[in-house]
Image (cartoon, rainbow, N blue to C red):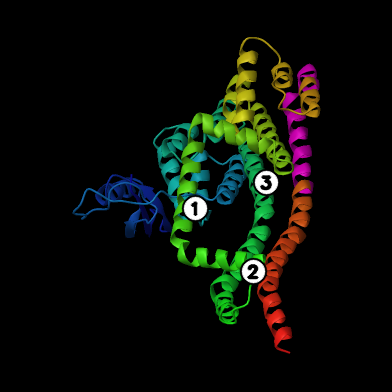
Amino acid sequence: MPVYSYKGVSGGGKTVKGTVSAESMRAARARMRIEGVFLTQIKESDTSEGSAGEGSGSSFNFQFPTRIPPIQLAIATRQLATLASAGIPLVECLNALVEQIEHGGLKGVFAQIRDRVNEGSSLADAISSTGKFDNLYISMVRSGEASGALGTVLNRIADYLEDQVRLASKLTSIFVYPAVLLGFAVLVVAMLVTVVLPQITNLLLSLGQELPFYTRMVIGASDFARDWWWAIFGALVLASVGFRAFKRTESGRATVDRIVLKLPLMGRVVRVVAIARFTRTLSSLLSGGVGIIQSLDISQHVARNSVIEEAIANARTSVLEGASLAQPLRASGEFPPMVITMVEVGERAGDLESMLAKVAETYDEQVETTVTRLTSLLEPLLILVMVGIVLFIMMATLMPLMSVTSSLQ
């Protein structure tokens, strides 16, 4: 449904502005007249979805899907939680929130939510109708509305989203600096192989002397890369496409995820991150009043590793049959003893969500420590690799030149 931004004057003479969703420009004007707003300006917002505004001659309007940054959603959720906790009516909360949001796509989404709530829908149903929110968000909002503690639940959602943003930032920090170093190394080697090396090669070959095997190897690699770069590039593209296609299959994803978990250093990071996501999500859902079965059903997908997801799915089945949660998690062999112990203590004490939150905090700290160690380890390692490659190419070209120079003397 299109979203229109407007400016006008209310019945009390105050200047107002905002957004409204309607089937057409005419419907938007009629709606604002009913609400007692005299419009001075109205236009279709850039964030609207669906058909174009009034006067459009085509029924087709292609738009790229709008991606909402997680940090922006966390900020908006925190603002809505603050307004709802202050006892302000929900529609007024959403009105104020739409005015505060700066991200265009998110503003349009919450404008649609506000309009649906104003029409009588529950907040959870209005959020679900946009198609922009995951099951965790919708389920927690629904439980908050049912329990009458919407402000508290929204705060928990905001905490969860902020934790996920921080975790994603930590994981990104592992790869950014090494990727920059690796890219610089590739650029240096490419310059040496395609620009410097051919000139030195011609000089060496013109002298008619026998070259060492490592010099011939570098020259051959240079010629191959220069003559067959298109084939190398095509092979890399095909390998990437094939790997992606393989990973999209159920068996392929399971194979890749199982191999990743067995990697010496990265495997531990992936496992810790998956468990931290699972425990924090399950704790947030249980604290929000969502049932254990539905919570497990939702939280298994946030692990983003099919091996861990399968273990959680089996635990859900066992809990549905009357078993405790700790027992199937231990049987899977994918969860460390500390996690099992904390879950057992939480189940016996009737405070499972609190114990899961402590597990998540502990594992978040482990992720930060591991990321710091990996970054400090990869930095000198990549520098040594880069220096080694450049030094090998330099030696392969300079040693024959030095030999020729000494023979001439």
- Considering depth in this image, is 80 or 106 the residue closer to the camera? 106
User: Alpha-carbon neighbours of circle 1 within 10 Å: few (<14), some, or many (≥20)?
Assistant: few
Tell me if 287 is positioned left or right of 294 in this view: right
Measure the alpha-carbon separation of dots 2 and 3: 47 Å
Q: Which residue is mark 3?
A: 167
Q: Residue at x 73, y 90 (%)?
A: 409
Verify whether residue 46 appears in magenta: no
Verify whether residue 361 appears in magenta: yes
User: Alpha-carbon neighbours of circle 2 within 10 Å: few (<14), some, or many (≥20)?
Assistant: many
Dot label at residue 215: 2
Query: Which stretch appears magenta?
Result: 345-369
Instruction: Please state the horizontal and vertical placement of residue 106, each as a whole percent of the image.
Output: 48, 50
Among the two numbered marks 3 and 1 on one chain, the one whose residue lies closer to the N terminus:
3
Q: Give the total of numbered labels.
A: 3
Query: In the image, is residue 92 above or below residue 286?
Result: below
Q: Which residue is mark 1?
A: 236
Among the two numbered marks 2 and 3 on one chain, the one whose residue lies closer to the N terminus:
3
Q: Main secondary structure of the magenta part?
A: helix
Q: Residue at x 63, y 77 (%)?
A: 209
